[in-house]
Amino acid sequence: MLKIESIDSGFRLYYKDYFILEHSRQNSCVKVGSGKGKFKSHHGHFKIKEKDVTERELREYEILSQEDNKIEITLGTQKDLLKVSCNIVDDHLEIKFSSENTDINRFWLKIRANKSEAIYGCGEQFSEVNLKGKKVPLWVEEQGVGRGDPPITGDWYTTYFPQPTFVSSENYYLHSESLCYAIFDFTHPDYHELYFWNIPDIIIIGKYQTALDTVSRLSNYLGRQPKLPEWVYDGVWLGIQGGKNVVMEKVKKCLEKGVNVGAVWCQDWQGVNIIGPTKRLLWNWKYDDTLYPDLPSFIRTLNSEGVKFLGYINSMLAPNGNQYGEAIEKGLCVKEQNGDTFIIVTDSGDKIMLDLSNPDTIEWLKSVIKENMINIGLSGWMADYGEYLPTYVALHSGEDPKEFHNKYPVIFAQANLEAVEEAGRLGDIVFFSRAGYSHISRYTTQVWAGDQLVNWSVHDGIATVIAAGISLGICGIGYFHYDIGGFHALEHISRDKEIFMRWAEMAVFTTTMRTHESIRPVGNWQFDSDDETLEFFAKMSQRFTHLKPYMQHLSNEYVEKGFPPIRACYLHYENDPELHKLKYQYLFGQDLLVAPIIKPNSSEGEVYFPDDVWIHIWSGEEFKKGVKKVKAPIGQPPVFYRKDSIFAELFCKLKDV
């Protein structure tokens, strides 16, 4: 299993006969050093710089012991002496590093690379899928607005959900148990350099026979999301704001037009703030009896029609809500270094942030969720934010906020899940997270893509949710969806009819269809902006529910095997290097090939067909391996099913829905 091979003045380490790393006195695989980091944050965006960086190669080495399942090595000398322990644990390799030099806060590790390999993962990536040739910083933050050249905010790599994990087309995964800022550099032809702002606790490496097995075993390690309830596949979730009367009017109109409505998602259930032309939410987690008088009764009425009610929560509180003062009085919020309450500035005003390092805060938050949300009938909610924790605050636990920052959204998701479990509602209630980090897959029932522009932007629009879904699927997330139509509408950017329709037809081939009115509901095209759109939306909802048997199959595959519903095409056709070039086409399970239209005024799409026989859902035409252009009018996106699929009859009937 583990083997060291001697080379000139050094060694090579092999795991399952796979060459992992090489060390010599001329070219060390590890460097250590020190540096000072500077974090500047604004509205969840971070500017991260460092200075006074020193680095030292650990050239000297000694092999202390060598067994089939365990190898002990030291690197370096004197104060930089680093102990390296390699152990086989379960079905993976664990590499642990330790040093008595507490001044070391920079660490570089070189992993052997292959010039032809492709690299996937690093959490949720919006602009790239194959990361070979890229340098990827890993830090939880806002994705950015209008990312491009130049961006309004953010860069191509900024993401709500980074993860120090990658999967190689050589069929191995590498995951680091580390919370610090890191940069994974895949630009070198002969090695991948992993740079951490501290010595990582453990490096985990798994090597397997197939790509699917690699992703499955990684999912075993990271943990899988709880299985979604079946009602998720019974209809769309209508994003509606404005109060009880508006909700009832829109639901009634949708049902009359044949929309299969599974739920209403009312993010303003707890009230709103109007800030200029935008409608922002009141961050106080109790229903607003002006907009939603007797909400529990209203929810029961909706439920009697087969419609669930979903709400909204995050980990901050607004000063115009009663929970704000309660949290301060009980010492539940993040503080300044001098002990004063920390006030964080957001784009919807000043807020306080819950200190999730404090067990009392966790219990308080869970009680709010159980009493004010679950007990009145909510079937789910958006668990928003999680990216904002600054690095200069004081936490109850005494932990370094530079380390707790990336963990914060995971703890938030865990608190939500525990509230659901303690209420006895796991398997019935769904909440969806935006921010994430390692192991959040154990705690969140869904992840959604966040706040995209409501347009065709390659770096911040419709295309980015495809890349996000593929990369998250590699990293252990199975249940993923997005705002149909996007969220961010700027003064010069608004959602039109075409982009809404293209986004809706694409969402049919995900595990959840949910709309959002956008940050500027007025002036942005909605599902009911005209009769044609509503009738089109009804057809998309019917297609989605038609696929329920297949959705349940994909859900079972994920829970049992760790195979994500949204899959990189290479996972089933790993001997085809052309598939590593694809960003905007994916397999939905093994049997559906989806290549959404991501450009305006397009009547056809270009598709790369893996080596199989594929049937065009809308025409019945057969396609085999290669690149083809396919007609794609609105309502007929390029979607194909595998001829040998056991669901072929179900897929064939989709065109008649």
Image (spheres, helix red, strand yellow):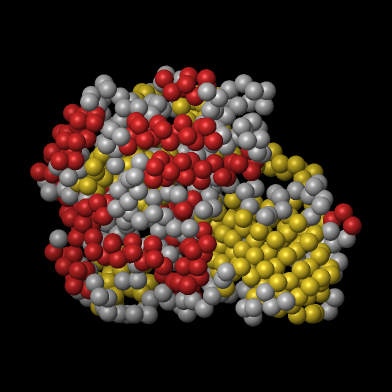
Residue at 36% from the left image edge and 66% from the top image edge:
557
Q: Position of residue 301 (x, y in %)?
A: 16, 35
Q: Up-down: is 339 above or below 178?
A: above
Q: Position of residue 493 (x, y in %)?
A: 37, 39
Residue 420 figure quarter: top left
Task: Report the number of numbered marks.
Answer: 0
Residue at 81% from the left image edge and 46% from the top image edge:
103
Of residues 56 and 378, the one drawn nearer to the viewer in this rendering:
378
Q: Residue furthest left?
A: 256
Of residues 35 and 92, the one drawn nearer to the viewer in this rendering:
92
Of residues 110 and 11, the one drawn nearer to the viewer in this rendering:
11
Q: Up-down: is 396 above or below 484?
A: above
Q: Position of residue 80 (x, y in %)?
A: 84, 56
Residue at 64% from the left image edge and 43% from the top image edge:
403
Q: Position of residue 158 (x, y in %)?
A: 54, 47
Q: Is residue 56 visible?
A: yes
Which image quarter holds the C terminus? bottom left
In the image, taking residue 591 as reference, residue 334 lies left or right, namely right
Q: Residue furthest right?
A: 78
